[in-house]
Amino acid sequence: MLHIVDGESVAGTLRESSIHGEVLIYGDLFYEGPTPASLGSDAWNEVRARFYSDAGYHSMEDARTIQLGWEHTLKKCLGSEEVVLWTDHR
């Protein structure tokens, strides 16, 4: 079972719990910044990384690394028999 959470706080709590499965983070804030349609993954990651960098959340290098980690999380879904999403109310 794969658990996908939207932040490290929830991830840490789940990892310390008795819940079975792998816990990964997908924390892209779709309600902030550009989310252009019809982009391939490389272009999407670059647009989103640029937003996070320009907004002062991360350096461009760190933002790119984080985006690639989130993409890895989505790819893990394809090979998982069961995926549970843990998200906030936004």
Image (spheres, helix red, strand yellow):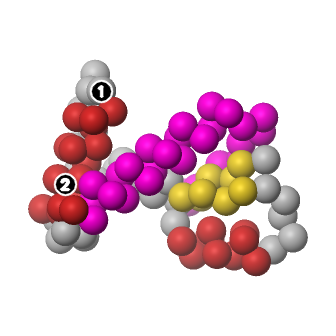
User: Which is in the foreground here, disc 1 or disc 2?
Assistant: 1
x, y percent for residue 83: 71, 42
Residue at (27, 55) in percent of width and height: 64
Q: Residue 40 carries which label?
A: 1
| 36 to the left or right of 10 | left
Residue 26 circle label: none
How far apart in space, not on screen, are marks 1 and 2 (Cα)? 17 Å
**Does residue 65 belong to the magenta stretch?**
yes
The answer, for residue 8, to whether it is visible in the render is yes
Q: Can residue 86 be seen in this view?
A: no
Q: Mark 2 points at which residue?
A: 51
Residue drawn at point x = 50 percent, y = 53 percent: 26
Relative image position of residue 90 (x, y in whole percent): 47, 55
Residue 23 falls in which quadrant of the image?
Answer: bottom right
Residue 5 appears at what percent x and percent y?
59, 58
Residue flagged by tag 2: what amino acid is it? Phe
User: Is the residue 10 above or below the residue 89 in the image?
Assistant: below
Task: Choose between 41 and 51: the one closer to the eye.
Answer: 41
Q: Residue furthest left?
A: 54
In the image, residue 38 sits, relative to residue 22, either above or below, namely above
In the image, 38: left or right of 13? left
> What percent of the width, then of the height, locates residue 67?
35, 52
Q: Residue at x 72, y 69 (%)?
A: 14
Looking at the rendering, which quadrant does residue 35 occupy? top left
- State the extent of the magenta-drawn residues as a range: 62-90
Q: Tag 2: Cα neighbours inside 10 Å, few (<14), some, or many (≥20)?
A: some
Describe the element under mark 2 as helix, strand or loop. Answer: helix
Q: Residue at 12%, 62% (x, y): give it.
A: 54
